[in-house]
Image (cartoon, rainbow, N blue to C red):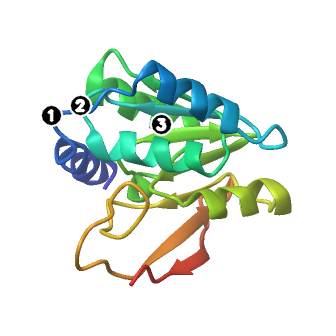
Amino acid sequence: MKQLLALAAVAMLAACGPTALAQDSQAGAVLTLAAADKDLPTILVYKTSTCGCCSGWVEHLREAGFSVDARDVAGGNPELMRIKVDAGVPGQMAACHTALVDGYVVEGHVSADHIKQLVVDRPSVAGIAVPGMPVGSPGMEGPNAQPYRVLSWDSNGELAVFAEVDPR
């Protein structure tokens, strides 16, 4: 079963393959840093350099006031999968990037508002995730957006619905 989940995660990560990425200007980066909310924790994001939707999600977080330390993993998808396993991300929660914030794991295209809710409310969970890459989630904007769920998991691997989102 674990091998099947790992294969599904690798296939999903492959969908986040090479794209032409726009480079932030130095002025834009300075403005983004200046706009970071001093009361919000820094989010450490692990992603691949070729994933455009991951870059879109990082920009979404910065626009919401988070300071983001985005790191492109040198080893590509195999190294990213190791990071997910080390962080305790359940296989069925896997998405294209993994983030660590204030003692929690955030997997996939979770909105900045839900991350803010997580760090303010401090629920007894290990992390939250938007599994896969649903159209309409932050970084995956586009036509034909569909409702999706933000799921949580605890230290025992028990899953629960953290939020339901309808981006239409």
* Quarter of the image where the C terminus is located: bottom left
Tell me if residue 68 can be seen.
Answer: no
**Residue 47 placement (x, y as % from top left):** 39, 33
Q: Residues within 10 Å of mark 3 (few under 14, many from 20)?
A: few
In front of the other: 152 or 2 = 152
Please tell me whether mark 3 sits on a helix, a strand or a loop. Answer: helix
Amino acid type indicated by mark 1: Pro
First-in-chain label (1 vs 2)? 1
Residue at which label 2 appears: 50
- Judged left or right of residue 84, residue 34 is right
In front of the other: 149 or 79 = 149
Q: Residue furthest top?
A: 74
Q: Residue 54's quadrant in the figure?
A: top left
Amino acid type indicated by mark 3: Val
Tell me if residue 122 can be seen.
Answer: yes
**Residue 119 placement (x, y as % from top left):** 78, 53
Residue at which label 3 appears: 85
Q: Residues within 10 Å of mark 1 (few under 14, many from 20)?
A: few
Q: Residue at x 30, y 26 (%)?
A: 49
Q: Are marks 1 and 2 in contact (CB under 8 Å)?
A: yes
Q: Nearer the viewer, mark 3 or mark 2?
A: 2
- Judged left or right of residue 106, residue 135 is left
Q: Which mark is residue 18?
A: 1
Q: Residue at x 17, y 42 (%)?
A: 14
Please tell me whether mark 2 sits on a helix, a strand or a loop. Answer: loop
First-in-chain label (3 vs 2)? 2
Please determine whether, in this image, residue 132 is positioned above or below residue 44. below
Q: CA distance from mark 1 to mark 3?
A: 23 Å
